[in-house]
Image (tube, rainbow, N blue to C red):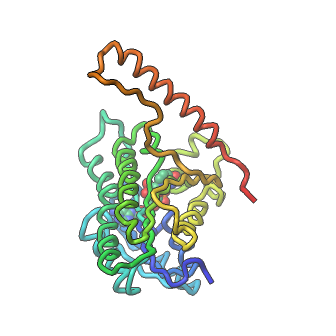
Amino acid sequence: MGVLEGKIAIVTGAGRGIGREIALDFAREGASVVVNDLGGGPDGAGQSHIADEVVAEIVAAGGEAAANYDTVATMEGGTAIFQTAIDSFGGADILVNNAGILRDRTIFNMSEDEWDIVVAVHLKGHFCCSQPFARYIRENNRTGCRLINFSSVSGLYGNFGQSNYGAAKAGIAAFSRILAKELEKYECTVNTISPSAATRLTIALRQGREGDFDPNDPMVGPQQIAPVVTWLASPAGRDVTGQILHVSGGQVGIMQQYAIIRSFKSDHLLEIDELDRVIPALVQAKLAADERGAKEGEPETLPS
Ligand SMILES: NC(=O)c1ccc[n+]([C@@H]2O[C@H](COP(=O)([O-])OP(=O)(O)OC[C@H]3O[C@@H](n4cnc5c(N)ncnc54)[C@H](O)[C@@H]3O)[C@@H](O)[C@H]2O)c1
């Protein structure tokens, strides 16, 4: 019996790339899956019914799936995607907010449209798809659900030329932390994935940077992300919430999140000359913590 037997899942952007692999893995593990995809280009332009191909693959393998072609970027789209789960399978237990696009440009050249569409698909898209699901959980007191969101090192670390995408992805990490608190009462876990995988969004860039890069190697392909998402969605993931997991080329790691790591306290309004000493000491503490964190985060061999 699969670890998701009897569960109903929605995966956005599941027509290709990482989302497709998650939808296939969920179905293999026994879930009924709504395969959502607008079917546009990497920049979000156009649309098609590529979700049908993934549905056909799942059904051919003996699984259950339904296609949806709506955009995640509007409330109407998010509501229709959720409704597909209700109409096709009578409920929903798992939502994976994975759909994404890119419109890279530095701040000097970015147009308002390039900013708006990227923030709409990623950050607003997470809201549009999550709200119907969250309301359904509360109205039906449906406990044990799972919400899995997609961030990126582009936002968590910062990446040149991606202020629209990175800001949306950092916002998604905050959105997840807050939803983890808001949905705790219903035993719904909310976690964030920071993936790295060879897909149409990354292959050209990585081929330019990494000499020995083979996009067909499953260890770098979108297949390597799916098992971690499936685990989080399964009963085994019940106690893991509010976390960011980085998944990349066989590495699975947990990300540090915001916390004060050193501070000073004063009983008077701070003077400029005091800040001359305080702020450099704080920055030093941060650099030392970064160095410690980088060492501790080095991949280890799997525990037995
Ligand atoms: N590939 C990586 O290394 C990487 C790194 C960091 C983050 N991510 C994130 O992972 C997620 C999946 O990316 P991927 O690499 O598989 O990309 P991909 O382009 O292969 O797949 C994304 C899918 O989302 C769909 N989509 C786009 N806009 C949509 C919309 N408005 N409504 C519904 N569907 C829509 C696309 O049609 C596409 O099929 C994205 O959120 C991306 O930002 C990927």
Please name whichever residue, 288 or 156, is drawn nearer the observer in this view of the structure.
288
Which one is in front, 53 or 58? 58
Residue 253: percent from the left, percent from the top?
59, 51
Camera-side residue of 90 and 44: 90
User: Residue 236 location in percent, x, y?
Assistant: 58, 70
Q: Tell which quarter ligand 1 is in.
A: bottom left
Residue at the extreme front of the image, as rendered: 267
Residue at (38%, 15%) from the top-left corner? 276
Mark count: 0
User: In the rendered view of the protein, which quadrant contains the C terminus?
Assistant: bottom right
Nearer to us in this view, 223 or 240: 240
> Relative to 114, is 211 on the left or the right?
right
Q: Position of residue 292 (x, y in %)?
A: 60, 34
Taking the image as shown, residue 303 lies to the left or right of residue 263, namely: right
For the point 51% across and 80% down, which residue is it? 31
Residue at the extreme top: 273
Give me the residue at 35% from left, 16% from top.
274
Q: Is residue 301 above or below residue 218?
A: above
Q: Is residue 82 above or below residue 123?
A: below
| Quarter residue 45 falls in | bottom left
Position of residue 50 in the picture relative to residue 108 (left or right): right
User: Image quadrant of residue 269?
Assistant: top left
User: Residue 222, position in %: x, y?
Assistant: 56, 60
Task: State whether residue 191 appears in this view.
Answer: yes
